[in-house]
Image: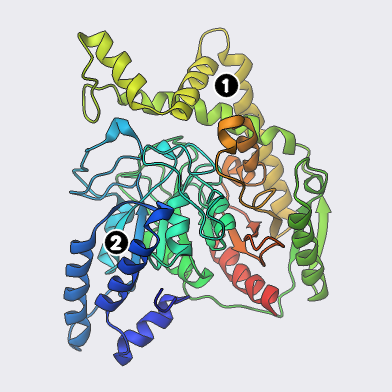
Amino acid sequence: MGKMYTTLTEIQRDLKSGTVTVKDLVNTYLANIKQYAHLNAYNEVFEEEAIAQATALDIRLQNSETTTGRLAGMVIAIKDNICYKGHEVTASSKILHGFKSIFSSTVVERLLAEDAIIIGRCNCDEFAMGGANENSNYGPVKNMADESRVPGGSSGGSAVAVQAGMCHAAIGTDTGGSIRQPASFCGVVGLKPTYGRVSRHGIIAYASSFDQPGPITRSVEDAALILEVIAGADDYDSTASRKPVEHYSTLKINTDQKRKIAYIKEVFDSEGLDAEVKETLLTAIEQLKADGHTVEPVSFEYLDYVVPTYYILTMAEASSNLARYDGVHYGYRSANATDLTSTYKRSRSEGFGTEVKRRIMLGTFVLSAGYYDAYYAKAQKVRRLIKERTDEILKQYDFILTPTAPEPAFKIGRTDIDPVVTYLEDIFTVQASLAGVPAISLPMENNSQNLPLGLQLVTKAFAEADLLNFATYFAGLRKS
């Protein structure tokens, strides 16, 4: 493994001094991709294209009269549910095998406009449905910290690519924790923006009222810069906010400003909370208090309802969104089909994996006549209560501090025994998703088995600048 840069600032300093070239960087990442191919982080690597882009960028960097973008020198990977014109995009599903996108997502266009180099597309849970990156047509991804364990999901490939130095940063998507949980399991930074802060145009939909693209990085500084580049209004996405994008990358840490931080007291009573995760949270609380901040317990009485509410709503949206994959328009079509009806049935039965079919069927059930009011309508009402209570807490406090996940990375194969156990991994991340507010997972020290642990900070909608500033301070405090 070559030099592991923590920030783009360090890379650009070395590029300027001539210590390294962009082509050198790309070749280092490509070498690491080959070395760690068994981790299965990538579904496809754009090797020749990345080298060609790096060579062209090096020429521009050497010419003092040409300007380069803010991400010049950043080699980035994208999750395999993000469209990139002329490149295959499958959402790690057989049903989209061989499908090439005819346009680029807004996120990709904005990255390329600032001279980022996209090195490949990363493995993920099929259609972003999963918390372990085991539900993939390309096979499971392995955690570099312990190859017998999962990397988290659904953006597991993206997190491992950053963790193992197979790229400098990656873009994932977060529906209920799919950026934050793998970031926690892999010891990197994962940011879920406010719903609507980043355009969903060109992102293959799982649950449209939840999905948000965001960065996975080795530093808060880079997460802030990437968000600044990809955020903002988009005519192709009516749900993208028109609020001005703040200068997130100009992080100003005010160590004299004392903040009010809440932690949810029910978290400590939560069944399945790992002892070392609990100890990490308690240590962080004491450190914050010692540095002069107010850290207080608050009651969040809906903690036991967040996971069922989230899954009822997302499965309902998934059943609607995935109706378009029918074996007729594009993607996989069963060779055994004999008429229109069998084309639908066989293509979907053969093309979708077990977990996706499970969620489509459950989603269709909760939307069906006779059950809509009992499940879907009730879940929408509970979502409103969860959002209102979260907003109420965030009016009184600057941040909510929780573990990102109740335990460290678990063994590969556990989800096959009981998928509900994996659903409960989302217990601390789905609150921010249901409320539509931003959250960031920050790496803490490893546990006694040398497995990464993460803590999560949540704040009010569109307060990413404050979140990123405090996250930078908090990360520094933990190291001091």
Q: Quadrant of residue 146?
A: bottom right
Vertically, is 370 above or below 387? Answer: above
- Helix, strand or loop status at disc 1: helix
Q: Which mark is residue 179?
A: none
Front in this rendered view, residue 294 or 344: 344
- Helix, strand or loop status at disc 2: strand
Q: Quadrant of residue 286?
A: bottom right
Name the residue carrying label 2: 119
Residue at x-position 45% and y-position 26% = 354
Residue kind at label 1, given as amino acid type: Tyr
Q: Is residue 250 left or right of residue 236?
A: right
| Disc 2 crowd, CA 10 A, few/some/many (<14, 14-19, 20+) | many
Residue 384, position as x, y percentages in the image: 64, 34
Front in this rendered view, residue 168 or 208: 168
From this viewpoint, which residue is outermost toward the bottom?
Answer: 17
Vertically, is 343 above or below 427? Answer: above
Q: Is residue 37 left or right of residue 295?
A: left
Vertically, is 25 above or below 361? Answer: below
Is residue 14 visible from the viewing direction of this image?
yes
| Disc 1 crowd, CA 10 A, few/some/many (<14, 14-19, 20+) | many
Residue 460, position as x, y percentages in the image: 62, 54
Q: Quadrant of residue 5?
A: bottom left
Callout in the foreground (1, 2): 2
Vertically, is 2 above or below 368? Answer: below
Residue 275, position as x, y percentages in the image: 79, 53
